């Protein structure tokens, strides 16, 4: 652990931020898994509903600075393409 008071504070804050970001990334992964699960089950309505939820979750994570905007755009594009290509 650091010896300087401000450095100790920074360690605590960076750990808290890391935990917060980890929770957001976990929520994004869960929402993406739900989309792919609906695609595998061939349920187009559920896939579209899950896609809307996943898109909102990813956009929120991007606005918080957890993901880069291009990363989010790429992931949303791939999810949308997968849902649209369902039979």
Image (tube, rainbow, N blue to C red):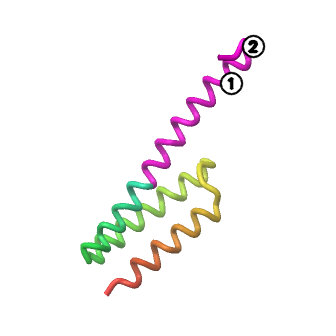
**Magenta part, dominant SS:** helix
Residue 58 x/y as whole percent? 51, 58
Q: Could you tell whether 32 is left or right of 13 in the image?
A: left
Q: Where is residue 23? Give x, y as percent.
A: 46, 42
- The secondary structure type at the circle numbered 1 is helix
Task: Please say whether residue 4 is one of the residues in the magenta stretch.
Answer: yes
**Image quarter for residue 59?**
bottom right
For the record, the magenta segment spans 1-28
Residue found at x 64% / y 57%: 68
Residue 83's label in the rendered image is none
Q: Of label 1 and label 2, which has the lower sequence position?
A: 2
Q: Which mark is residue 10?
A: 1
Q: Is residue 44 above or below residue 66?
A: below
Residue 41 is situated, as x and y percent measured from the top left of the image, at 24, 73
Residue found 42% across the figure and 66% down from its top: 52
Crowd rating for badge 1 (residues with CA inside 10 Å; few <14, some 14–19, many 20+): few
Q: Is residue 84 left or right of residue 77?
A: left
Q: Is residue 78 above or below residue 24?
A: below
- Tag count: 2
Image location (x, y in percent) of residue 73: 58, 68
CA distance for labels 1 and 2? 10 Å
Q: Quadrant of residue 28?
A: bottom left
- At 43% across and 50% down in the image, what residue appears? 27
Residue at left offset 75%, top offset 13%:
4
Mark number displayed over residue 4: 2
């Amino acid at each position: 652990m650091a010896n300087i008071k401000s450095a100790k504070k920074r360690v605590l804050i960076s750990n808290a931020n890391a935990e917060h970001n980890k929770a957001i990334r976990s929520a994004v992964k869960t929402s993406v898994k739900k989309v792919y699960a609906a695609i595998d089950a061939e349920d187009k309505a559920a896939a579209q509903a899950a896609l809307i939820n996943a898109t909102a979750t990813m956009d929120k994570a991007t606005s918080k600075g957890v993901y880069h905007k291009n990363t989010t755009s790429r992931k949303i594009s791939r999810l949308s393409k997968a849902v649209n290509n369902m039979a």
